[in-house]
Amino acid sequence: MANTVDNSFIEFNREIVNLNSNITETANNSRDWLVTQLSSLDMKDGLDFPYEYIGMHVKYGSFARKTKIRELDDIDLLFCLKADGAYYTKIGDTYVISSVNSGQRLQNLSDNGTLNSRKIVNKFVNSLYELRHYKSAEIHRKGEAATLKLDSYVWVYDIVPAFYTDTALYLIPDGNGNWKATDPRIDQKLLTETNQSYESKVLQLIRTLKYWNRHNSTYTLGSYLFEQIVINFVKSKYELSTYMDFNIRDFFNYLSINIYNSVYDPKGIQGDINNLILSEKDSVSLKADWAYNKAKDAVFAETNEKNQEKSINKWREIFGNNFPQYG
């Protein structure tokens, strides 16, 4: 319970939205441990695991970007392998990796001289049982990663095999046997620089709004798309308000309008990532407009009527019953 709007958001973020600091520390340590374990696979006798490209792995995803909200369910890791003589060819948006000149370990995972990304993912899945504390492993539903479950943790690890290219991009499985380009470092750099440029207010704003998106929107936007929309909103403003509730109010108005616009991949790879159909965009727009009007009422009650209780109750309508009560 809180007696001011500011305190209610502080409590809400601390108790409901943000990951517990102890969980975060444990998860970071477990991910680092996992990297060391994966690094040992290519040295195990009889496993013929592809050789690791040391120092080129990437911690990515919302947990790495510090935009993950409770509960922690997955941790993403891009694990880089040596090309070992293999080379790629780009055909449209698809990449094909030729293994005719590669070492035997990659040739064993190929079809007629072409490295099969599904076989690479399968190799990860079948090799993970070598790890200590192993519980289970399976292919991720998109076919791009090996999903590992360890005994000790409630979260899973999505491990994506990758190759680093001479164009400074990573090639990862496309789910169909071939490869596609990505570079999650660009996403991290954009978010870090935006957060720094706006007085470190962006990460918490994203997390709080992601809670609304997950729990209270009629149509839940994908996490990555939603983050990009929040970043675009922030960059459309000269500065963010000192008060989180003002920024949230303004975002709802922005979302209700801009959900109909293109949202471009900052990596310059995927193009427009706003693939919602019109009815989905309409649903998001209507819900955001509803939230905007509630937020306007909440801010008015706080600033003009000097009624903290009324304002907090309005925010509870927007964020749900987990938002603190007045008192």
Image (spheres, helix red, strand yellow):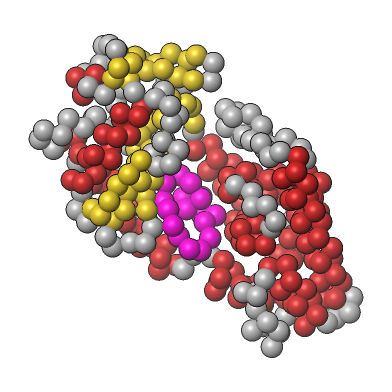
Note whether 290 is above or below 54 in the view shown. below
Residue 57 shows up from this direction: no
Note whether 249 is above or below 302 in the view shown. above
Left or right: where 32 falls relative to 316? left
Q: Residue at x 39, y 25 (%)?
A: 177
Q: Quadrant of the N terminus?
A: bottom right
The residue stretch that appears in magenta:
60-78
Find residue 297 and report its horizontal and vertical position in percent: 85, 70
Question: Toward which corner of the image does residue 294 lie, by quadrant?
Answer: bottom right
Q: Residue at x 74, y 77 (%)?
A: 312
Left or right: where 248 falls relative to 128? right
Residue 57 is a magenta residue: no
Note whether 271 is above or below 2 in the view shown. above
Q: Quadrant of the C terminus?
A: bottom right
Among all residues in the image, which is located at the extreme left?
Answer: 45
Residue 88 shows up from this direction: yes
